[in-house]
Image (spheres, rainbow, N blue to C red):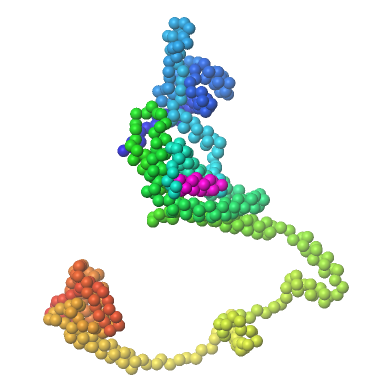
Amino acid sequence: MQTFKKVIEASYLTADKAWSYRAILRYFYIQHERMREFLFSEEIFDYLTDLDGFADYTEEQLNLDLDQLVRWNNLVARQETGKARTIEEFKKKRFRYQCTPYTVEFERMLQEMEKGGEVFGGSLEKKEFERLYQALYEIETILETSTFPRPDECAQTWNDVFTYFRSITKNTSDYIAHINSEEAEERMQTEAFLVFKDQFTTYLRDFIIELQQTALKIQELLKAIDVSTLHPFLKQVITHQQHVPRFEDIQLDEEELIQTELDKWQSLSIWFLGNELRESELDMLQIRTNEQIRRITRVVQRLGERHHYFRSRKKDYLHLAKWFDSLSNVSEAHELSSVVFGVFHTNHLFSDHVPTDDIYTSIWDEKPMEFETNPRIRHYREKTRPGAIVSQRDQKEKIKQEHLQNKLIEQQTLDKYMQGNEIHLDQLPVVEPYVRKMLLSWVGKAMMRKDHTFQTEHGRIVKVMMSKNERIILRAKDGELEMPKVTFHFLGEVDVLDGTNI
């Protein structure tokens, strides 16, 4: 199990003397990039004294700082004994220093962050997808021919695939974060963005077009390559990795190394194809890019409306005035006015009357509509006539008798289906639709209570017993219903007056 220990190598970044520690280790990193691994304190001191803020810095302070960085595992000290010219030089324990891998990675990361500043970088590189496709196509060709190149060539092709894939994921995610950042949002609200918007929109649109053309081919390749056929190819890759001489004692099993590479392949497939839990990141990238194009369109539209709102119409009106002044008579002026300003004093009538649904019907084929307008005065009210109250007693009585008659028929039907004090649904013949509805409503009422009992409209207590394993077919005149086996057990009746069981 991986343990998350304290990273003491990062202590120099937040220590009180970070200004000197970071200057020392930055010099080590620069020399490491130039393939100079071992440095002496004299060389480091000469470098530091040329920097601002180190005018009072002494060799003794440098030696203390170097010792502290050795204790934090940022540097490795090795005594230089071969070039001692005097006994005093040998006693001084002249050291040469080498930076550790942690330090190199920290400084490399810090340098990249310093270049980018406090904003996201990234880009939408459309050619990266084409390079990834070519690398995947090369792997597919190797698997189809079953003729594997040398291990170093297989490893190079495999590394190319994931180098391009990491570049795609990093650059696209950083760029999407950049255009969604607060700083980008503020710049989009300025007038200067109108000049930049065409270039920005073209950039996104070209990326979408290239993505749609290439990504589909990549998806087809990933679907065509079976994971099981990758094992011989990955063995070639692992063989090359194991041939690289290293001094670490840890030797991973070949199956573990192959599984690690297969996990990387799985991540690549999920990014392009998705899985049963989520859609692919490729689809999400297309959606987000299209959203940005729509967002830019909305921003530009708002900026244009705002710019048009504050724009002076003085020159337009002067041009119209000269135009009217050049006309010879009023009739021509009226004609020009009707074109420029529209028709004056028009009456608009509205009606919700829809005479036909045929959109091709001419207005001359329609019958005239009548529309009554009400006067717009404060105290106007429509005239109403007082109406008499009509008695509905006969209709109520008729409906009541019909309801009681239906309940009586239901009760007689149930008595016909009862066996003692129980009704077994699996033993019923073909029943009427209203009986099926009533029985199912009983089941619903009973299931809402813990003891699975309820009271019918006729005052009878019924307990519903439902089987968890057996299923039956309830047949009715309007169809058949498959359901669990249910038995209705009638416990007794309830006195409507006092609520006691009889």
Near-viewer residue (358 or 248)? 248
Residue at the top extreme? 87
Residue 320 in percent (x, y) is at 79, 66
Residue shown at 45%/51% (left/top)? 222
Q: Is residue 22 above or below residue 154?
A: above
Near-viewer residue (475 or 402)? 475
Residue at the bottom extreme? 394
Q: Which residues are magenta?
A: 127-142
Horizontal arrangement in the rendering, residue 272 relative to residue 418 (left or right):
right
Residue shown at 71%/58% (left/top)? 311
Magenta segment's dominant SS is helix
Residue shown at 43%/19% (left/top)? 77
Q: Is residue 220 above or below residue 87?
A: below
Near-viewer residue (30 or 214)? 214
Residue at the right extreme? 328
Horizontal arrangement in the rendering, residue 46 relative to residue 162 (left or right):
right
